[in-house]
Amino acid sequence: MLKDQNAMKGLRTLAVHAGEEPDEITGASAPNIAMATTFVQDELLAFSAHGAAEKESFIYTRWGNPTVQQLETKLAALEGGEACLAFASGMAASAGLVLSLMKAGDHLVCSDTNYPGTAELFRETLPRFGMTVTPVDSSEVSAIETAIRPETRLVWLETPANPILRLADIEATADLLRGRDIALAVDSTFATPVATRPLSLGADYVVHSLTKYIGGHGDALGGAVIGARDAIAALRLEAGIHHGGVLSPFNAWLIMRGMTTLPLRMKAHEEGAMAVARFLEGHPKVKRVLYPGLESHPQHQLAKRQMANFSGMLAFQVEDGAAVAQRMMRDLQVIHYAVSLGHQRSLIYWLETDELLASSFKLGGQAAESYRAFAGEGIFRTSIGLEDSEDLCADLARCLD
Ligand SMILES: *Cc1c(COP(=O)(O)O)cnc(C)c1O
C-alpha cells in the first residue's frame, strides 16, 4: 500500500521515510538493494533510450534502478524539488549538468572561488568545447549582472563556497535572472537541504556531492542534481543514459542510509563547528576564523537569512601555516589530516593561497586580492565531525600552542 505523502511534512520525517516503502513481498521495513543491471520485460520495447526515458518500469540500471530511484525520491523530497537524478560522484553531477545545458558558443558565469574540481572543469574543459566562462566574485550580485552577455546560458553558484566560506545570495541572483533565458544552478554541498533549499529561493537546479554531508560517513562517492520534472527527465536522457556516470545501487543504499540521519547530524555538526570556531577565535595563535555562524563573518547577516543551519565547515589562518600543517600530520590524535568533508570524522587540510590561485582558480589582480582578504597566505579548511568539541579543541591546541 502506497503511503499518503501528505503525512510526511517535517524534514526529519522525510529524511527517514521519503522514497522508502516496505518490501511488497517480504514486508521488510528496510530498503532492499537491487543489485541488478537488467530487468526482465513483459512487452515489446524499442531499444533506444529515447523511448525508455518515459517508461515507468525498469529496463537497465544506467537508465534507472529501484534502489537509486528510492534515493532520488528522498533527495527530491528533502530539497522540495519535483525530481532528482543521482550520479556516480559530485563531479559527474556537475559535469553532466553543465555539458547537457550548454553548447558551443554559450557563456557561463560562475563563482571565482569554488570546489577545485569544478573550477578546473569550467576553466580547462569547457573552453575546449567552444564555451566561454567568466568567473566573478559571486558574493556581489552586481558582479554577476556585469558579467552577463546575450549568450549567457547558465549562472553557477556555490554557497558557502569552498574553501573560504564566502556566500552568494541565491534569491537576489534568481531575481536578477528572472525573465532572461538563463538557468541558475547552485552547488549546495556545504549547506545541505537542512540549511538552505535553493529551489525555494528561485534556483532551477541544486547540485550535491552526496559524498559529503548527505552520505555523511566518508564511505561512498555520489552526486545528484534536483530540479523540475521535465528538466531532470532531459538530464537523465543525456547525462545519465548517454554520458553514463550513474550511481551504483550499492552506493545509493549506503548514501540513503546516511541520509536518514542528516537533520540530526547537521545539528551536531553546527554545534561542534560553533564551539570550535569560538575556541579558535579566542586562540592567540589564530589570525582569523571564517565561519558563517560567527558574528565576525563578513556575510553573517546573509548567512542568518539564507541558512537555517550554519553547517560544519570552517576555515582559519595562523602564522606559518605550512609548519603547523606539518605538526598536524604528526601530532593530531583525533582529527584526520585529509581532504574531503561532511563525515562523522573531523578532517583538516592546509590550502596555501599562492598555490591554489595559480592552479585551480587561476586568479590574479583584484580577484586574487579579494581571495587573499579572506584567506591570507593560506587557510586550514576544517570539517567538524560528530566528536566531542572539547576533544577537537584539545587536538587543535596540541598543534597550535
Ligand atoms: C566534493 C565536492 C564536489 C565534488 O564531489 P565528488 O563527490 O568528490 O565528485 C563538488 N562540489 C563541492 C562543493 C564539493 O565539496
Image: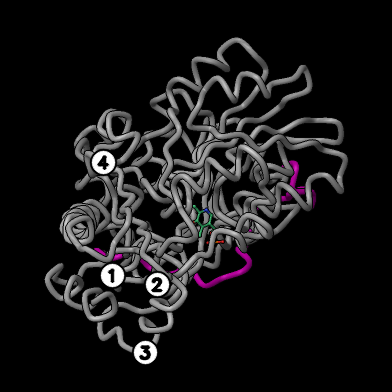
Type of amino acid at the residue the image marks with label 2: Gly
User: Callout 1: few (<14), some (14-19), or many (20+) C-alpha neighbours within 10 Å?
Assistant: some
* Residue 88 placement, left or right of 313: right
- Residue at mark 4 to residue at mark 3: CA–CA distance: 31 Å
Q: Mark yes or no: residue 16 visible.
A: no
The chosen color scheme is one colour
Residue 344 is tagged as 1
Q: Earlier in the sequence, mark 3 or mark 2?
A: 2
* Residue 61 placement, left or right of 383: right
Mark 1 lies on a secondary structure that is loop
Q: Give the residue at mark 2.
A: 218
Q: Does 221 sit above or below residue 190?
A: below
Residue 296 is tagged as 4
Q: Mark yes or no: residue 167 visible.
A: yes
Q: Position of residue 25 (x, y in %)?
A: 33, 64
* Stretch in magenta: 29-51
Type of amino acid at the residue the image marks with label 4: Ser
Q: Give the residue at mark 3.
A: 330
Question: Of 117 and 293, which appears nearest the observer?
Answer: 293
